[in-house]
Amino acid sequence: MQMAYRLNQEQHVKLFITPELKQSLHILQLAGMDLAPYLQEQAVENPFIEIEWLSESFYSGSGVKNMEKSNFNPLDTYGTKAATRDTLENWVMHQFRMTDYSLEQFKAFSYLAGNLNEAGYLAVSMKEAAQKLNLPSDVMETALRTLQSLDPPGVGGRTLQECLTIQIERDPQAIKGALEVVSGYLQDLSKGRTDKISKELNIEPLQVSRILTYIRTLNPRPGLAFVADEEQNIIVDAHVYMNSNQFVIELNHRDHVKVSVNKEYLHMVGGLNDIAVSRFYEEKIKEAHWLLRSLNQRNQTLLKVITAIVEEQAGFMNGTASGIRPMTLRNIAQKLDLHESTVSRAVKNKYIRTPRGIFELKFFFSIGIQTNGGEDISAQNIKCMIKEMIHRENKRKPLSDQDITNRLNEKGICLSRRTVAKYREEEHILCSSLRRQTDETLNYG
């Protein structure tokens, strides 16, 4: 039988993220308190980037009033955030409860979650865990894979190598070759043996340098984010206040910096005769201009997103509504004609000062749950209702999760008992058995 050969022409579409675009995305998601140190690092590496520290500078945009001078006290720039009560164990258990699981799987997973150390590494072997729980090894391995698939990325790793590998495998923007370097050459990389890595993996030294830069962006201790401090200082990214029945939004740049291209260095470049040096400087000038564009784009995007959030949550902001409206990232993205991921980066770790206090931007996002009457109510509002019920409950006979579920159902809000328990836990409220008080404790209080 004779085989037939044919040439087929196929077209494929691939998405490439340039270093410049990646930098823009990174700058967008930086919180105000992290932006200035990042810019300082860029200035150290690039002689054409000039930084001027500002004492006061505010921006305002479409739909808001322009203010020549801020009327905020300097202390309003800052705020404090109470230490998080969530532990890493509670956080992964919360995520696990959102999945379907058997009693055996719950037993295995909860044991692993309880054996995470402060850095987020698993401090028990699979063999030891299986023997301790008297469970099959395949059940423990399934629990481990589930744990390592959760946030924060890298949690559940047993070694630094495994922790970084998990993060690389979950990163769609991971640089080519990073997984191979971490898997087989992490020790060589730490000792600076880049030539060996380049030769054995048959990649250019420049690519090895890029891989090293990427690996440095990974988190070797993902669990530390859940270590509670006494108090965390924050810098407010924007101020929202009322002026003549109109919302005014001011981006806070008090602790940011003014970035420009150093003109003195620009004049020096024109007189260079060395082609290699001239090309190097031209590349640095290009990077400096791109940084300026990225900063400007960040400010514009952040202002648009905050303005849209304020418009959607105007009732909460001005005090006419007790809770927030249902609102998702998609709602804001569609309203501004932006990608959902752009909005997500814009609100990440950002705080605003409002007439009702300081809030993290993600606080204003809540899915809508439809009542029997056809109205939408946000999950945040439901949490407030649950807190109010518990506040008013009989302390000798506190409401169970099922009691709360029944009361919500009577109000036309149909939720499962598991969802009510989840909302209660997210508000750091104990279960009914732990809230129960006796006459003795009540009298003592």
Image (spheres, rainbow, N blue to C red):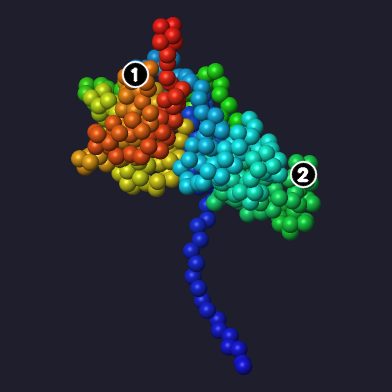
- Can you say whether 73 is above or below 49 in the image? above
Q: Distance between the residues labelled 1 and 2?
A: 61 Å
Q: Give the amino acid at mark 2.
A: Gln
Q: Which residue is drawn at 77% across and 44% down?
A: 187
Percent of width and height locating residue 275: 66, 50
- Can you say whether 433 is above or below 204 in the image? above
Please state, as top left, top right, bottom left or bottom right, where the C terminus lies in the image. Answer: top left
In the rendered structure, find residue 394 and report the number of the disc placed on it: 1
Q: Tell me if I can see residue 384 in this picture.
A: no
In the rendered structure, find residue 187 and report the number of the disc placed on it: 2
Q: Could you tell me which secondary element the residue under label 1 belongs to?
A: loop
Percent of width and height locating residue 92: 53, 37
Q: Which residue is drawn at 50% across and 73% down?
A: 10
Q: Which residue is drawn at 64% across and 45% down?
A: 135
- Can you say whether 92 is above or below 277 in the image? above
Percent of width and height locating residue 19: 56, 48
Residue that extends furthest to the top in the rendered view of this protein: 444
Q: Residue 330: which quarter of the image?
A: top left
Asked whether, in this view, residue 432 is left or right of residue 36, the answer is left
Q: Residues within 10 Å of mark 1 (few under 14, many from 20)?
A: few
Nearest to the observer: residue 174 or residue 41: 174
Count of labels in the image: 2
Q: Give the amino acid at mark 1.
A: Asn
Please state, as top left, top right, bottom left or bottom right, where the N terminus lies in the image. Answer: bottom right
Which of the marked residues, 1 or 2, is nearer the chain's N terminus?
Answer: 2
Q: Could you tell me which secondary element the residue under label 2 belongs to?
A: helix
Asked whether, in this view, residue 122 is left or right of residue 308, the answer is right
Q: Residue 263: which quarter of the image?
A: top right
Nearest to the observer: residue 94 or residue 152: 94
Percent of width and height locating residue 152: 55, 39
